[in-house]
Each structure stands twice: as C-alpha cells, then as structure tokens.
C-alpha cells in the first residue's frame, strides 16, 4: 500500500497561528481567515472552530468578526465579553458592530494548506479502466463518528456470488482533520490507511472495494473512493448519497435501470435505486474500475436496503462499534 498521499495538515494549529498575526486594535473576518487557509468555503468551519477550541486569556479569537462587522459569537457564548475585549484594545464597536473600514487586518502570511490539498486532489488522476480479473469477493468500507475527535472505520468482506459475509473488522482512530465541504477525503484517508493495514495483515483484501463516498463523480474527479483506491492499490467503486455534479433525471428511477449522470458531455456515473426505496444513490468508478464495472457490480450487490449491501453492512458495523465507544 502506498503511504498517505500527503501529510494531512493540522488546520487547528494553522488557524491558531493566523490568529496570532492579528494585532491588538485590529480585526479580521472569518472569510479572510478561510482564504488565508486556502479556501473561502472554509469560513463556516473557521466560525465553528473559534467557538470551540483550547482557549485562554492570551487567545486572539475575539479579533475575528463577521463580514458585515457584526462581532458574532464568542467562545464564552457571551458576545458582550467579546465586545469588551475589543473595546479595551481600542476597537470601535457600535450596536454590536465593528467599523471594518477602520483597523481591518488581512495581511496573513500562510502556506494556504487547503489550496495545496485541493491541487493535490486535482492532480491524482485515478485510473478508470476495466477490471483485470473477474472478482470473486467484494468489501464495503465506511466511517462512523464517535465524537468530533474520534471515529470508527469498518470493513466487511463478502463472497460476490452468494453475498455471504466472510469477515469483518474495525479500527478506532483519532479524527485529525475537520469536516469541510470538498475535503472529506483528507478527513477519512488516515482512518482508511489504518484500516487497510489491519486488513492486509489478516490477508483479507477484497478484489473490489465499495467506498461510502464518490469516485470520479466529484468536482475534482477524485473523491474519497478514488483516493482510497490509490492509497490501497485495490479497485474501488464510489457510492455517494448526494449528487455533487452532473445532470440526470432523478424521477422514478427503476432499480433495474440505472441512469447515466452526464457532466459537460461526459458520463461520470449512474443514479440508481434499490429495494423499495425511491431515493437514489450515485455510483461511479473510483480507481482501477470502469463505468461498466461500477454499474454491473453494484447491481450484483443490491438488496432490500436503500444502499448496496457492502456499504450497508460496513455502515452498520462502524455505527455499532461507535455506539459502544460512546457508552
């Protein structure tokens, strides 16, 4: 197995370093901090992190406000305390708002770690090609969260002909990367890497992996399923619950008739249904599989549940262990 594609950055530490750059008497915004990290779309996470982080009197999180000047929330849940700290540093606050035209700071020196991750993902180029061998086993992998800081990755191996469960295992891992839209792969890759080490030691690697996440049906053409395939070297198929891009008629999809998802004239995957559910899921090649492989193999592992059996079983396993960890 390849090592992780990249050392996943400690975004909390990166954010803490950026906060320390904001001098007393100046303010910045959640959006500017997100851009300094490399993606304006991370502004929501920045806001969440600044009301839930290790905090003491030296912390500068009170110097971050909303784009309209509203002081926003504070870690103590008392906005007045935030206002008082800003005023003591000479910031003018009127009716709960800061005058951004006066004392605004955005001179951040940052390696923009999110931009680096995004570029890495865009350069992955998973191999979309027919399977080299007829598979006899498949497995599902999924992650469930015990808390924002701990997760369980589950693996369930099945006989493809009978769909009999042959083996399963889990690993409990720390969560080192936050949930930010578009970066799920980097949150879960360390967990999958630990899981596959255990699976390989037991000599239980499946011929094809079904991954809870997208393959090439992704804005950067390399979702979680593609990344998992690349780090494991195992053919993968992505199963997503949300349509990230592409056009397809989602009305009344028969379970036996997958519909092509087309983006800019290219077929990237299929919308499918299973069992009695009319809620579609979205299948695409991850790595070392083709569009036909992803469609045909998924149809082979459909059951009475909404999602393909390998994914459903891995989800159930990881959830059960996560519940045990919580209790």
Image (spheres, rainbow, N blue to C red):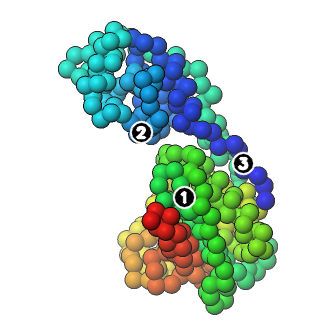
The numbered disc on residue 238 is none
Tell which tag, 1 or 3, sits nearer the viewer: 1
Marks 2 and 3 close (CB-CB < 8 Å): no
The numbered disc on residue 5 is 3
C-alpha gap between disc 2 and disc 3: 29 Å
- Identify the residue at image location x=45%, y=37%: 53
Say what secondary structure mark 3 lies in.
loop
Mark 1 or 3, nearer chain start: 3
**Quarter of the image where one finds residue 289:** bottom right
**Quarter of the image where one finds residue 202:** bottom right
Marks 1 and 3 close (CB-CB < 8 Å): no
- Identify the residue at image location x=67%, y=84%: 166
Tell which tag, 2 or 3, sits nearer the viewer: 2
User: In the displayed structure, would residue 151 be above or below residue 15?
Assistant: below
- Identify the residue at image location x=36%, y=11%: 89
- Identify the residue at image location x=49%, y=48%: 179
The residue that mark 2 highlights is 52
C-alpha gap between disc 1 and disc 3: 20 Å
**The furthest residue to the bottom:** 162
Marks 2 and 1 close (CB-CB < 8 Å): no
Q: Callout 2 environment at 10 Å: few (<14), some (14 to 19), or many (20+)?
A: few
Q: Is residue 189 left or right of residue 81?
A: right
The numbered disc on residue 151 is 1
């Amino acid at each position: 197995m390849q090592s992780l594609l990249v050392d996943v950055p400690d975004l909390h530490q990166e954010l803490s370093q950026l906060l320390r750059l904001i001098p007393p008497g100046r303010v910045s915004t959640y959006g500017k901090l997100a851009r300094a990290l490399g993606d304006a779309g991370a502004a929501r996470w920045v806001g969440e992190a600044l009301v839930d982080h290790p905090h003491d009197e030296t912390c500068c999180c009170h110097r971050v406000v909303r784009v309209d000047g509203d002081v926003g929330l504070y870690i103590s849940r008392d906005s007045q305390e935030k206002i008082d700290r800003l005023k003591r540093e000479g910031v003018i606050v009127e009716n709960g708002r800061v005058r951004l035209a006066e004392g605004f700071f955005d001179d951040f020196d940052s390696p923009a770690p999110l931009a680096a991750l995004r570029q890495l993902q865009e350069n992955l180029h998973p191999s979309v090609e027919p399977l080299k061998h007829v598979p006899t086993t498949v497995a599902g992998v999924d992650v469930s969260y015990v808390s924002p800081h701990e997760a369980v990755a589950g693996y369930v191996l099945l006989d493809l002909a009978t769909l009999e469960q042959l083996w399963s295992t889990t690993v409990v891992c720390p969560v080192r990367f936050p949930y930010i839209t578009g970066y799920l792969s980097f949150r879960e890759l360390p967990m999958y890497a630990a899981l596959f080490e255990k699976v390989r030691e037991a000599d239980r690697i499946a011929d094809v992996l079904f991954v809870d996440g997208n393959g090439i049906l992704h804005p950067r053409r390399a979702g979680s399923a593609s990344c998992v395939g690349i780090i494991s070297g195992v053919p993968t198929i992505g199963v997503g619950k949300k349509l990230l891009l592409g056009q397809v008629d989602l009305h009344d999809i028969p379970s036996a008739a997958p519909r092509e998802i087309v983006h800019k004239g290219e077929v990237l995957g299929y919308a499918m249904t299973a069992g009695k559910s009319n809620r579609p899921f979205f299948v695409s090649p991850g790595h070392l599989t083709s569009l036909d492989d992803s469609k045909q193999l998924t149809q082979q592992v459909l059951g009475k549940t909404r999602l393909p059996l390998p994914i459903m079983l891995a989800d159930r396993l990881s959830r059960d262990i996560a519940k045990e960890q919580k209790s």
